[in-house]
Image: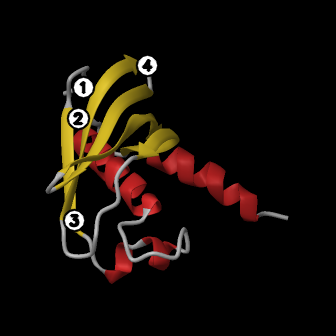
Amino acid sequence: MSVTVGLKGRAETIVNENNTAQAACSGALPVFGTPFMCALMEEAAWKSIAPCLEKGQSTVGTKLAVSHDSATPVGMRIWAESEVTEVDGKRLVLKVAAYDERGPIGQGTHERFIVTDERFLAKTSKKLEG
């Protein structure tokens, strides 16, 4: 199985005191934090792609360009959706969007790359050397 254009994903959460702008130190108000919206969008993306990869492969996020258009209070359900719009070798581009129970709250694009886990981690670990 391989990653194809049109592949869709979804992730959801409930806004609580642990995923507010206050908790992320990205603002002073008790509303769903933009960093958590971005993370939910990435979760929808990588989880939809993972079953299509070979054993020992993962994806890593490299770009995220989004707008956070509407605030969501504590207690509301949030979900993010992703859709693969481009496959260029190991580079994947996705359309992402987030919603609460009242409608859209954010949208944008997300880029991920398919990596070989062992090689990626070995390269990353070299940063710890002298």
- Quote the CA–CA distance across marks 2 and 4: 14 Å
Quadrant (top left, top right, bottom left, bottom right) of the N terminus: top left
Q: Name the residue under label 3.
A: 13
Q: Name the residue under label 1.
A: 2
Element at badge 2?
helix
Q: Name the residue under label 4.
A: 89
Going by the image, does 91 lie left or right of 48? right
- Quote the CA–CA distance across marks 1 and 3: 28 Å
Residue found at the far left of this picture: 101
Q: Which amino acid does label 4 sit on?
A: Gly
Q: Which mark is residue 52?
A: 2
Residue at 34% across / 52% down in the picture? Answer: 70
Q: What residue type is labelled 2?
A: Cys
In the rendered image, residue 28, in percent from the top left (x then y), is placed at 52, 76
Classify 10 Å Cα crowding around label 1: few (below 14), some (14-19), many (20 and above). Answer: few
Residue at 64% across / 49% down in the picture? Answer: 123
The answer to the question of whether label 2 and label 4 lie on touching residues, with beta carbons closer than 8 A, is: no
Q: In this view, does 22 lie above or below 39?
A: below
In the rendered image, residue 84, in percent from the top left (x then y), is placed at 29, 27
- Quote the CA–CA distance across marks 4 and 1: 11 Å
- Quote the CA–CA distance across marks 3 and 4: 32 Å
Classify 10 Å Cα crowding around label 4: few (below 14), some (14-19), many (20 and above). Answer: few
Q: Which of 10 and 16 is in front in this view?
A: 16
